[in-house]
Image (spheres, rainbow, N blue to C red):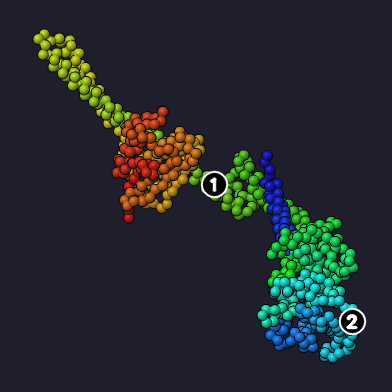
Amino acid sequence: MRFSLGFVLALSLVGLQFIAILIVVLTTYVSSERAMLTHARDLMDKAGTNAVEHIKRFLEPATENTEQARRVLTSGLISVTQPEEMEEYFFQLLLTEPQLSGVYFGDEDGNFVFVMKSNEVGPFRTKIIEVEGRARTIEYIWRDEDFNVLARSYDPNDVFDARTRPWYTAARQLGSRIWTNPYIFFSSQQPGITVAAPIYGEGDTLNGVVGIDLDIADISLFLSGLVVGSSGAAFILSDDGQVIAHPDPARINIRNDNGTLGFVGIDDFSDPVVRAAFAGFDANAETGAQPVRSSFDYNGEGFMTLLLPVPDIDLPWNVAVFAPENDFVQSIKDNRARNIWIAAIISVLTAIAGVTLAAIILKPVRAFAVRTSLVSQGEVSTDEPLPRTYKELSAANATLIDEIAQRRRLDTKLQDLNRELTHVTRVNMMGQMATGLAHELSQPLTTISQNLDTALSVAKMDATPNEELISILSELDEQAHQGGDIIRALRSFVRKDKGRAEPFDMLELVEQTKRLLRQELERGQVTTDIQINELPMALGNRVQIAQVLINLMRNAIDAIVMADSPVRKITISAVPLGEMIEVRVADTGPGVANNITLFKEFSTSKPDGLGLGLSISRTIVEAGHGQLWYDDVQKQFCFTVPCETQ
């Protein structure tokens, strides 16, 4: 089905504009989608990394101060048997590091010194337990920032024993600094963690354990101020799935059956979105040592999650972050929707403009086409001026006429070459056949003539010669000599003219030969590869060299087709070698069979061949002072032709 140029032009302009806009829109859509996800992940990563760094900064002073207290108490700078000295030292530590909740020391006898921050009578409260024998004294002291005593009291009912607390037993058992799992502090009944270290005396005897408390509410306070989108949040999960810290501290504590406080598990958390995001949390499977990003849907809304392990601490904590995707990308989505609508409107406008522009462009083309049609019908003379049109069309018209003239000249030249080749082929064939026949018949004719001479001699030596027999034998001898003369005369008559050697372009001759064999190449589905660069002008009979090329190329085509080669290709190359040009014809056929004698008349592998092509070709090449041979290694025919030299 054919379409008019106007339709094709209009469709092309509109189609190209539409495709261009569509590509831009799709590219923008995909890139913006990628940018949105990258933007959201970056914000999530930033929030998670911020939380991790804050947690590390929150915990590092406790670790450093615990090591400092351990060294001070071990060295004896502060005596573990002097509660007043330890109280003042612990007080100074709390003043120096505001994030510490309390500092204390307990020994193997049950003595205990504890300085903590307080919201009661004074900002600091000290608890001292002294044990003498079976008597226990528990004293509470409230002090201000200047270490002045504000109040004192005693509590004989206090049953606290540091030796039974998890921080003491773990440090004593491991013999090194430890972090406890989060637990509810005995005194404040608030969630927190403890870092503790054993204090050894002489002979590596355990004198006691020093510990520092950290109130997890401080971490929760930081998490409440951490911005994760407009409605997201970050919290801390332990490896066993307990919520350690949350922007809303009231949600993380639960009352156990025995009346004590504990931490809520993620599967029991009151926020349904948090449960949907992290239900069934398994630290080993979920995080390992790498951050884990995921997404989920809740009530038709997409959410993003991030799990980050907290490195470089001895606590099994993970920072969990979640937020709705729209918190990060809603503005980008709105902008993308606007861009799509703008692109659609632009597409419609450009389509209208494209149709109009196509009509304007096509107007002079139609006028030119009408004139061409009238000229072809003879209604308008070719001398009539062209209608007003584009310069390119006028130039194209001139170029087309010139190309047609060149093609006609080339066709004429090819026809002349073909006629000359036909004549040369016929003459060469007859000459080669005459040469072959003369060579093959000369010996039997000579033998016949010699035998007839012998028979005549024998007949004449008879006592009564038979004149009739002698006449017959003489006539046969005369006819034998006459037959030889006729063959020699025929050979001399059809012997080809060597022609005059003239310069010619070898590449041009190869190209023309290829065109002459185009139908045979197409019928055999054989391709050609001409590898000829700049060459000097060849010297020889151009038509006869063309005959050699045709013979070699036809042999190559027949070899490829008869062998049904999977790769069907003929490669023709030529290189200058001093005063000669060496031409090589290679093919992807099976090569020359061992039972074939090359360049011998009537020796062929073709069922319908005469076996004269290679013999004629060698005669032509040698007549022009060249050589023709077969390269067994490269499996290609080669011949040389003289060339011009500077």
Tell me the number on the disc at residue 155: 2
Out of 113 and 336, give the one closest to the viewer.
113
- What amino acid is at disc 1? Ile
Residue 575 is left or right of residue 66, and the answer is left
Residue shown at 71% from the left, 78% from the top: 206
Q: Is residue 54 above or below residue 504?
A: below
For the image, the number of numbered tags is 2
The dot on residue 630 is: none
Which image quadrant is residue 314 in?
bottom right
Q: Find residue 488 and report its image quarter.
A: top left
Q: Tell me if mark 2 has few (under 14), some (14-19) or many (20+) residues whose alpha carbon lies within 10 angstroms of its own.
A: few
Element at badge 2? loop
Whether residue 37 appears in this view of the structure is no
Residue type, mark 2 in image: Asp
Residue 159 appears in the picture as rendered: yes
The residue to which callout 1 is attached is: 401
Residue at image position (69%, 64%) is 289
x then y, percent, for residue 74: 70, 83
Q: Nearer the viewer, residue 204 or 472?
A: 204
The answer to whether 424 appears left or right of 385 in the picture is left
Instruction: Tell which of 641 and 409 is nearer to you.
Output: 641
Q: Look at the numbered disc 1 and give the secondary structure of its residue.
A: helix
